[in-house]
Image (tube, helix red, strand yellow):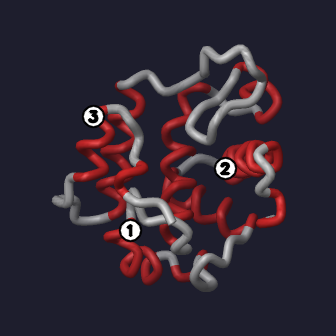
Amino acid sequence: METADDAPPHPALRSVVEWMGFTSADAKYQALVSVSEQEGWGLSEKISHYTSTSELSAAESEIFEIEASEVAALFWAYERYENLIGSMTAYFGEFADQERTDHAKFYRGDCQWSFDLAVGFMASVCGLPGPKCLSWVAKIVASQVRGGLYDRY
C-alpha cells in the first residue's frame, strides 16, 4: 500500500498531498489537478514510447488519443479510484469512507479492482467522457503489463 512518503517529488504537489485541511476529495482533487497543470504536466520528454503512470509520451498520446492537457485530470482521477478501493492511501486516503458512501456504485470491496468501475468512477469525478477515461485506464494496464503486473487484471 502506498503512503504519503510515496507522494510525487514536486514540492508544490507534496504540500497539497500533505495538507489535511481539505473538506472533500473533490476539493483536494481540484487542487492537485491545478498544481499539476501549473507544473507543466503533459507530454513526457522521454525517448521511450512508454512512460510511468503519471506521464504520457507522444506515442502514447497518439495511440490512446489523450491530449497533454488531460493528463493531470486523468492521472488524479485514477489515483482517486485506487484510493476508493483501498489499494493505496497516499493521496485521498482520509476521504475513503466518504468516497465509498458518495460513490457506492463504483465500490465493490477492498482492493476489488474493476476495469468498468474504474472508468465509470473516473468519468464521474473528472468530468471527461468515458472513452477518454477508458483510454487512460488502458494506458495504465499497458504500462503495468510491461512491468510484470499483468496478473492483477
Identify residue type, mark 3. Ala
User: Could you tell whether 76 is left or right of 153 in the image?
Assistant: left
Classify mark 3: helix, strand or loop.
Answer: helix
Q: How far apart are marks 3 and 2 (CA)?
A: 25 Å
Q: Which of marks 1 and 3 is nearer the N terminus?
A: 3
Q: Is residue 103 above or below residue 2?
A: below
Task: From the viewer's perspective, tell me whether residue 67 is left or right of residue 12.
Answer: right
Cα separation, mark 1 vs mark 3, equals 19 Å
Instruction: Residue at 74% x, 67% y: name it.
Output: 116
Q: Which residue lies furthest to the left in this view?
A: 21
Residue drawn 56% across and 38% down? Answer: 54
Q: How crowded is mark 2: few (under 14 residues within 10 Å), some or many (20 or more)?
A: many
Q: Is residue 90 above or below residue 84?
A: above
Find the distance from the CA under tag 1 to the CA under tag 2: 21 Å
Q: Where is residue 59 in the image (x, y as percent from the top left)?
A: 78, 22
Q: Residue 33 carries which label?
A: none
Q: Where is residue 9 in the image (x, y as percent from the top left)?
A: 38, 35
**Residue sitting at x 59%, y 32%:** 55
Assign a secondary structure to mark 1.
helix
Residue kind at label 2, given as amino acid type:
Cys
- Depth check: give the residue in front, 11 or 67: 11
Q: How crowded is mark 3: few (under 14 residues within 10 Å), some or many (20 or more)?
A: some
User: Amino acid type of disc 1?
Assistant: Gly
Disc 3: which residue: 12
Of labels 1 and 2, the one closer to you: 1
Q: Mark 2 points at which residue?
A: 133
**Quadrant of the drawing holding the C terminus:** bottom right
Query: Mark 1 sits on what residue?
Result: 93
